[in-house]
Structures are given as C-alpha cells and as structure tokens.
C-alpha cells in the first residue's frame, strides 16, 4: 500500500484517557473497492452464464494452420511484442492483422469491442483472420476491468471466428476468459496456442513420407506372395497350367504395375508437400531475391506502415544483413494503416 490509498481495515480500537490517545490495532486490510468489484464480477458472471454465453458446447476449435492471425491489444504494451515475437519464431507464414486499442480506462471496452467486430464482421470473409487473440499484460483488478465489461463480452460471443482471451497472468480470471473459445494464461501462451511450430510440421511431413513408402512396399510384398501361392496351388491341382499361368502372370504384372504406380504417386505427393513447406520457409524466400525487414528489437515489419521515419531497422538477405535507418516515407506516400 502507498500513502493516499483508500483501504478497508478490521481490528480493535483502544482509547487511553490519560494521554487522550486513540489506537487502532489492525488485523486485516484490503484496498477499498476490491470487495465491490468482486461482487459486481460475480453478479455479471451469473447473468451471462444464465444467458448461455459461457456454454462449453458452443466453443470452437482453433485452426491447425492459420493463414491470418488477428491481434487486439495496446500498441505500446509488452503483450504486442510478446505475441509477435512468438508468432515470428513458430509460424512466420501467417499474416498478422493488428488492431491497436487501449486496454484500460473508460474508452477501452468500447474500442476493444469495436476491434473484435471489425475483424469478425466488417472485413470480407476472404480477408478475415482465421483466429483472433484479445488481451493485455498483467495489472490490478481495476486495470483488467475493461475485459469484464458487457460490450467486450457480447463482441467475443458474437464473433464468427475463434477468439483466444489472454488477459493478465495465469492467476487473473476475467469474463472475457470465460466467454472466449480458448483462454490462455498469458499473451505469449496465446501465441503458442494459435501458431504451430514450423519445425514440428516439417518433421511430421518427413515421417508421413516414410510411412507411405513403408506401406507401399508392404502391400507390394503381400500381393506378390499371394500370387505365388495361387500359382503353386494351380500347378499342383491342374495337369496343364500353362493357360492359367499366363493369366496369373498377367495379373501379377498388373498388380505390380498398380503397386509401383501407387508408390510413385505417393512419393510425388509427399515430395510436393515437402517442397511446398520448404518453399514457404523464410530462407527459401530470401533465396528468391526477397529481403526480410525487422525492427531493431527483432519484430517483423511486413509492411511500410510498420515503421516510421527515424526508426532503426535491419534488412536481411540470403547472404547477409545490413542495419539501416528509415529516412522518409515510401515514394507512393506510404499511407499508414492499422491492418
């Protein structure tokens, strides 16, 4: 507690007539207003729960490989930096659609709700993100209260795309956490939840390729053994098996051809998938003559609007990198957009 804070205390009061002094021995103290906030939290929670806003059966699964990820938080807070850093490391193939909003104060609930609606309703279907992260870093109950306000709760409930709530720390619980499709304990954890690890995806592709090859060889061997058994049986039972032998040989050749073609098509499919994963990697993009631009802190800057004149940036090519300073807007005017 600090000087000037309003508090509610409980204790014993003692009066000393000789000196005319009054003494209060406190055995419990809490900031004034915490109890009222908790009571209001429980009242709203009961009302929204009765309306079915927290029904677990309506919660949606997160997309496995998101192409576009929406982020709604303060532009100046640590949450934005934490989220974008994790996304850049795990799944750089995704496009980040950022909507900066205040995350505390009187204007925060309305602006956060509008940002959610703008991503889920106002954008055309093909431009919408596949998943949205809404949240902020830690703070007091008063700091986090915007995420208990009805406009935010209604906006999350009405959003047509999955929403991940990442408000405060693991011990903080808001009504936004309860209505969202998924609750993350921190903003960094939210990014981990929505973004697959590109290295794990590459390993899975290689494992799938090995499985396809093994099964193709297994099926070819089974077909060959069955044909040999049939041929041997016919030779024992029939006096003249030349005609049968020719037909069996023809079927054997056909089975072998089909097995080899199936194996070849499987290899081509897995090779194509592996090539697509490799082509989408950041290093392959650099090898094609492109460059990656990031801020001095390592945050990706995918658009001209991501930086301002005077910002220090790093430009990385396939064979090296240079540090640079932004000296002016792009030739076309560089109209800045929050998208």
Image (tube, grey):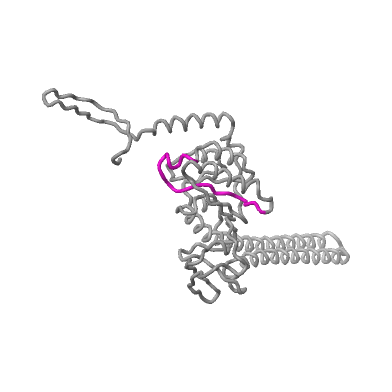
Task: Determine the residue positioned at 50% across, 57% down.
Answer: 86
Residue 296, horizontal then vertical, whole percent: 46, 66
- Counting the numbered discs, the total is 0
Q: In which quarter of the image is residue 329?
A: bottom right
Residue 206, horizontal then vertical, whole percent: 60, 63
Task: Determine the residue positioned at 64% across, 65% down.
Answer: 274
- Residue 232 vs residue 165: left or right? right
Looking at the picture, tell me which residue is in the foreground, 233 or 194: 194
Residue 137 lies in the magenta stretch: yes
Residue 128 lies in the magenta stretch: yes
Looking at the image, residue 49 lies above or below residue 90:
above
Give, as a single range, the part of the protein colored magenta: 127-146
Outermost top residue: 17
Looking at the image, residue 322 lies above or below residue 87:
below
Question: Would you say residue 120 is visible in this rendering?
Answer: yes
Outermost bottom residue: 319
Task: Determine the residue positioned at 59% across, 57% down.
Answer: 337
Looking at the picture, tell me which residue is in the foreground, 323 or 197: 323
Question: Would you say residue 65 is visible in this rendering?
Answer: no
Residue 156, horizontal then vertical, whole percent: 58, 41
The quadrant in which the C terminus is found is bottom right
The quadrant in which the N terminus is found is top left
Task: Determine the residue positioned at 72% across, 63% down.
Answer: 220
Residue 278, horizontal then vertical, whole percent: 61, 67
């Amino acid at each position: 507690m600090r000087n000037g804070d309003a508090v509610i205390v409980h204790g014993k009061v003692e009066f000393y007539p000789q000196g005319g002094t009054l003494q209060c021995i406190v055995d419990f103290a809490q900031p004034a207003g915490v109890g009222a906030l908790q009571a209001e939290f429980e009242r709203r929670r009961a009302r929204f729960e009765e309306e079915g806003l927290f029904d677990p059966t309506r919660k949606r699964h997160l997309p496995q490989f998101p192409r576009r990820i929406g982020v709604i938080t303060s532009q100046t807070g640590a949450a934005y930096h934490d989220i974008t850093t994790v996304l850049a490391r795990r799944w750089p193939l995704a496009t980040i659609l950022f909507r900066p909003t205040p995350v505390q104060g009187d204007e925060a609930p309305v602006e956060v709700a509008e940002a959610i609606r703008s991503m889920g309703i106002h954008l055309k279907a093909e431009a919408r993100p596949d998943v949205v992260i809404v949240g902020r870093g830690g703070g007091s109950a008063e700091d986090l209260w915007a995420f208990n306000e009805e406009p935010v709760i209604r906006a999350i409930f009405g959003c047509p795309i999955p929403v991940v709530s990442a408000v405060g720390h693991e011990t903080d619980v808001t009504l936004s956490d309860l209505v969202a499709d998924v609750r993350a304990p921190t903003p960094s954890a939210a990014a981990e939840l929505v973004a697959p690890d590109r290295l794990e995806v590459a390993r899975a592709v290689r494992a799938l390729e090995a499985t396809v090859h093994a099964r193709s060889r297994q099926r070819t061997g089974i077909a060959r053994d069955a044909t040999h058994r049939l041929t041997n049986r016919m030779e024992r039972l029939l006096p003249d098996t030349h005609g049968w032998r020719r037909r069996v040989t023809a079927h054997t050749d056909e089975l072998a051809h089909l097995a080899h073609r199936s194996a070849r098509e499987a290899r081509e499919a897995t090779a194509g998938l592996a090539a697509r994963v490799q082509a989408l990697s950041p290093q392959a993009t650099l090898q094609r003559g492109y460059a990656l631009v990031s801020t001095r802190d390592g945050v990706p800057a995918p658009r001209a609007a991501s930086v301002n004149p005077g910002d220090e940036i790093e430009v990385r090519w396939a064979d090296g990198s240079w540090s640079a300073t932004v000296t002016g807007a792009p030739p076309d005017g560089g109209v800045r957009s929050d998208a």
